[in-house]
Image (cartoon, helix red, strand yellow):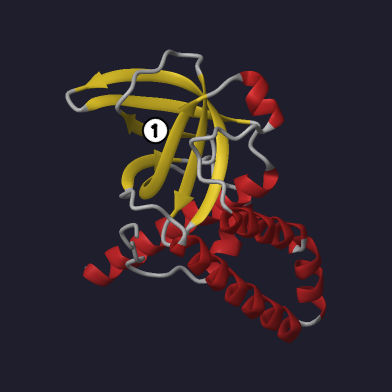
């Protein structure tokens, strides 16, 4: 079982939706703890979405990915319903939240014993530490599990820079072929982390 990571504070759905609706995120970047797997890939694999055999592809991940896709496809309809009936919108959102909790628990139960690592992430790319070197222009496949939701995204990126450290390499990458669904998931997660950190800072003052 992997190490459990719990949020210090929780951002409300209203706060997150308000920021996302403004569309003024300018690729916010955060430091965050995630579960991460990286493998060498190719442009052809990135275009076809071919998943490396080293990545976890069990049924639980496929299920959660399908649930996130359905949720994304229903967002516009939910917003329209919300304009007509706020009570119905609140009810449907509560059902979505329950489904998210179940999906997250299923995914968490199927995770390996790998430990979270600290990365720097935005909607545009990922900065992470690696035990192997990459060259600028290399295409990589990325399996990124966000915590504590345990939402797992399979992404592809291009290496921008690789710098040697005492303990390995610092790799900067830019995302390729990022789907709208994955972009929205990343954006929501980043905003939630930022709002939770801001709320904790205010509480500590």
Instruction: Describe the element under mark 1 as helix, strand or loop.
Output: strand
Q: From this viewpoint, which residue is outermost toward the left? A: 166
- Left or right: residue 182 versus residue 170 is right
Residue 149 seen from this side = no
Q: Position of residue 133 (x, y in %)?
A: 35, 18
Please, which residue is most extreme toward the bottom here?
87
Asked whether, in this view, residue 174 is left or right of residue 9, the answer is right
Closer to us: 193 or 105: 105
Q: Residue at x 30, y 50 (%)?
A: 115
Q: Nearer the viewer, residue 134 or 11?
A: 134
**Relative to 166, is 106 above or below?**
below
Above or below, 131 relative to 153:
above
Q: In the picture, residue 168 is in which quadrant? A: top left
Query: At x 36% / y 34%, what residue is drawn?
Result: 128
Q: Position of residue 107 (x, y in %)?
A: 51, 61
Q: Is residue 47 visible?
A: yes
Residue 152: image location, x then y, percent: 52, 51
Q: Is residue 136 above or below residue 180?
A: above
Q: Position of residue 183 (x, y in %)?
A: 61, 45
Count of numbered labels shown in the rendering: 1
Q: Is residue 43 left or right of residue 124?
A: right
> Mark 1 packing: few (<14 Cα in 10 Å), some, or many (20+)?
many
Residue drawn at (64%, 27%) of the image: 46
| Image quadrant occupied by the C terminus | bottom left
Location of the N terminus by quadrant is bottom left
The residue where tag 1 is placed is: 127
**Residue at 69% of width from left, 45% of height from top?**
180
Q: Give residue 135's quadrant in the image.
A: top left
Left or right position of 62 against 116: right
């Amino acid at each position: 079982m992997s190490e459990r990571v719990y949020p210090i504070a929780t951002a409300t759905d209203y706060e997150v939706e308000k920021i996302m609706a403004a569309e003024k995120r300018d690729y916010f970047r955060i430091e965050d703890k995630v579960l991460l797997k990286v493998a060498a890939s190719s442009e052809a694999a990135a275009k076809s979405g071919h998943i490396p055999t080293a990545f976890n592809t069990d049924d639980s991940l496929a299920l959660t990915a399908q649930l996130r896709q359905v949720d994304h496809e229903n967002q516009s309809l939910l917003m329209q319903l919300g304009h007509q009936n706020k009570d119905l919108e609140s009810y449907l959102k509560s059902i979505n939240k329950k489904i998210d909790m179940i999906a997250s628990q299923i995914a968490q139960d199927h995770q390996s014993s790998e430990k979270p690592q600290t990365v720097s992430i935005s909607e545009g790319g990922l900065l992470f530490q690696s035990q192997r070197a990459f060259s600028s222009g290399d295409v990589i496949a990325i399996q990124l599990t966000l915590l504590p939701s345990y939402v797992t995204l399979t992404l592809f990126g291009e290496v921008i820079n690789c710098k040697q450290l005492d303990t390995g390499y610092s790799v900067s990458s830019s995302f390729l072929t990022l789907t709208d669904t994955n972009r929205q998931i990343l954006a929501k997660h980043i905003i939630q982390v930022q709002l939770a950190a801001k709320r904790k800072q205010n509480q500590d003052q």
